[in-house]
Image (spheres, rainbow, N blue to C red):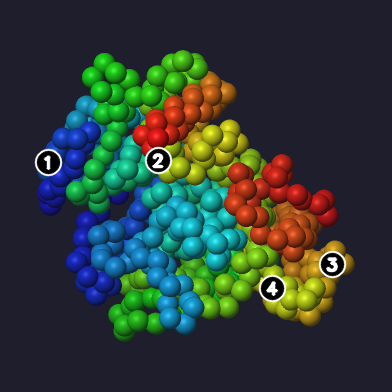
Amino acid sequence: MKQFAYVRPATVTEAVAAAAQPGAVYLAAGTNLLDLMKGNISRPDRLVDVTHLDGLDRIERLADGSLRVGALVSNADLAYDAEFAKAYPAVAEALLSGASAQLRNAATVGGNLLQRTRCAYFYDTASRCNKRESGSGCDARDGENRTHAVLGWSDRCIATHPSDFCVPLVALDAIVEIEGKNGRREIALDELHRLPGNAPERESALEPGDLIVAVRLPPAARGFAAHARYLKVRERTSYAFAIVSAAAALRIENGKIADARLALGGVAAKPWRARAAEDVLKGVAPTADAFQEAAWRALTDAKPSGDNAYKIELARRIVMRALTLAAAGTPARIPALPASPFASTSGAIHA
Amino acid sequence: MNHSISLTVNGARRDFVLDDPRVTLLDLLRERLHLTGTKKGCDRGQCGACTILVDGKRINSCLALAISHDGADILTIEGVARGDQLHPVQAAFIAHDGFQCGFCTPGQIMSAIGMMREAQAGNDPERIRECMSGNLCRCGAYAGIVDAVLEAQAGADETNQRRSA
C-alpha cells in the first residue's frame, strides 16, 4: 500500500477543503477503499477521515414525510431499523442481500453509493483498464466477461456498478445531498452515477471535495411498502455480488396498478431505472401478461458486451418474478435468505 | 508524522503511537499487542478470520484502519473467556466439533457472539447460516458450527427467560 497522509477534519467544511486537494479521497469505513489500496488499484496521497464528523449518522423523518438517512449510517443499522424496514422493505432487503454481516456493520450509506466496480480487470493492475488508467484499453472486452454490462456500456468500458442498495433507492427516486466547495446541493440518485461513454474513469457527477452527507427518500416512496421486493441472482446464495437483480415496487388500488417502480442491478455502470417498463404497468391489472410486457420493455435496449447474452433473458425473468412477488405482497418479515429467488419461503412462481 | 490513539482492548485501556497510518486494527492487535488469536486469512475482507467486535459490533479488522478507530472499545477472542471458564459459544464449538484445523475458529466465535447480540437470526438454522456467511471454513465444519451456535443461542434464551421469570 502506498504511503498516505491522514487528515481528520473537525467539520464538514474542513473536510471539503481538505478533500478538494489533488490526490485526496474520503475515508469512511474503508471496506472498499482499503481493499483497493491494498491491491494498489487506488493510490491516494491523502485520506480525509469523515467517520468522526458529527450529525451524519442519523435517520430522520422529515415533516413532509421524507426520510433522511445520514451518510455515515451503517448498512446494518439502516436495514435493521424497524421503521425503515417497514416503510421501505425492498431497500432493507437489498441491504441485507449485500456483502456479509461484518461488512454491513462497518460499511456506510455514502460509501455504498460510491463503491467501485468489481470488474476483475479493474482489480488486476497487470490488465488494461480505462477506468483505472484512462486510455490504456479494456481487457474485459476480450476477456472473462460473463458478468459484465448489457445496458449502457461503451467500447471503452463494460463494467457494472455492484451496489444492491442503490437499485431500490433509484426506483424510489432517492435524492443525494452533497456538500461541496460552493455549499450544499442535491441531485437525484439517478444522476449520481455516469455511464462510461468515452470517459469511464469519471464515474460520478461529484466534483473534487464533494461529500455525500445524506440520502433522502421523498414522501411518495412510502406508498409502495405493501408491494415491494428486491430479487438478486448470484453465483451463491449469500455473500456474492449480483449477476442480475431487480427492485420492483407497486402501488395497487382497486385491483389496478396505480403506480409502478422498477430498477435493475448488475446490468450497467449505474443502477438502471426501467421507466419504459413502469409506464406499461400504470393503470393496468397486475397480471402475468402485464409483467411479461414490462420485462420485455425493461430490456429493449440491452445488448451483450461479451459472453453475457444470457443476462438479458435472465434479467427479463428476474423482473417478471420480482413483479410477481411484489404484487403478491411484501412478506411480513424479510426472508431468511434476503433477495433469493430460490428461498423456500419466497412463494416464487417460475416465470 | 506520528499519531496517538487509545483503544480499550478486552477491557484494558491501551495507548499507541502510530508512526505509520497504514496499520490496520488486525495488524495492531497481532504485532503490537501480540494478541494473535485474531487471524489474518485473506487480509481483504472476504474470509472473516479477522472478525472482532468494535463497540459491540462484529467487523473485519483487516479492513479497519487503527488510526480511524481512536477511542474504540475492542473485544477479541482473548477477551471472551472468564479465566478458565469458557464463553458459552466457545464451549458449544467444542461440544459440537465446530472446527477441524481451527484457523477460522476465533473469527467464527467472534462472529457468532456478534450475531447473537444482533438478535436477528434467533434459533432459525437458515437465518444462522445466512448471518454467518461472512466466515469461511476451508475444512467445511459448517454443520458443527451451526449446531454450536444453535446450542449457544438456546442457552442464552434460557438464561434470559430465567432472568425475566
Q: Which residue is mark 4?
A: A251
Q: Secondary structure at mark 1?
A: strand
Q: Amino acid at mark 2?
A: Arg
Q: Nearer the viewer, residue A278 or B144?
A: B144
Q: CA distance from mark 1 to mark 2?
A: 28 Å
Crowding around mark 2 (Cα neighbors within 10 Å: few <14, some 14 to 19, many 20+) is: few
Q: Secondary structure at mark 4?
A: strand
Q: CA distance from mark 2 to mark 4?
A: 36 Å
Q: Amino acid at mark 3?
A: Thr
1 and 4 marks in contact (CB < 8 Å): no
Q: Secondary structure at mark 3?
A: loop
Q: Which residue is mark 2?
A: B117
Residue sitting at the far right: A289
**Residue A10, how many percent across, how many down?**
19, 66
Q: Amino acid at mark 1?
A: Asp
Left or right: A258 with respect to A126? right
Q: Chain of mark 1?
A: B
**Residue B115, how many percent across, how many down?**
44, 39
Residue A287 disc label: 3
